[in-house]
Image (spheres, rainbow, N blue to C red):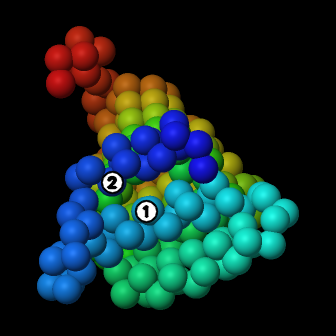
Amino acid sequence: MNKEYKNKIRSELERYDMSFKAFILGYDSWYIGTYIFLKRIVDYYRYNSVITNRLIVGGGKWTMRRIGRKVGFQFSEATIDFGLKIFHWGSIVINSQAKIGKCLCVYPGVCIGRTKNGVPQIGDNVTFFTNSGAYGNIIIGNNVTIAPNAVVTHNIPDNCVVAGIPAKIIKYKSIDNENKS
């Protein structure tokens, strides 16, 4: 594994308590961080044909499934770029064929699912709040916030906030405000 990839993993896991104490006490943060760490390891070694790499992938997937059942996550095969933030354990389901950009923020109850037309493609800096979802062959742009309980079933442009069932744009974000935070 190259140094750049290790640094990306390390920076992604900084927000989670991965200490031995957290493991012993059963902190949610340890389970979430371990799940993300294993996902990154499995993603790195998945397409190599060396026997040891296949063993790493198999062991990583097995452990991910065990942790996933405990915390409610199911997205081991999904293509998710670095910067993934999970704020609390709970049911989070992401289709294995979904393509997701950098800095995805996910709260419990999120479902990114497939319909007969396809799966969503999600841009960078997207936040899915509690019990929201996206379904079908849609594209969600960059810097989008999806409100709690919203269901996205059509394309969403960049820099906006959506809410409702089906989701509608309720506000466009100011680019100046994004740069200040």
Q: How many marks?
A: 2
Q: Does residue 47 appear anywhere in the picture? A: yes
Q: Quadrant of the C terminus?
A: top left
Q: Does residue 111 appear anywhere in the picture? A: no
The answer to which of marks 1 and 2 sits earlier in the sequence is 2
- Front one among 109 and 169: 109
> Which picture quadrant has residue 160?
top left
How far across and how far down the image is residue 152, in percent? 48, 51
Q: Is residue 5 left or right of residue 43?
A: left
Classify 169 as above or below 174.
Answer: below
Query: Could you tell me the amino acid type at mark 2?
Result: Leu
Query: Could you tell me the amino acid type at mark 1?
Result: Ile
Name the secondary structure under disc 2.
Answer: loop
How far across and how far down the image is residue 48, in percent? 79, 59
Classify 148 as above or below 158.
Answer: below
Residue depicted at 38% across the width and 31% down the height: 143
- Look at mark 1 in the image and give the residue it sits on: 36
> Which picture quadrant has residue 145?
top left
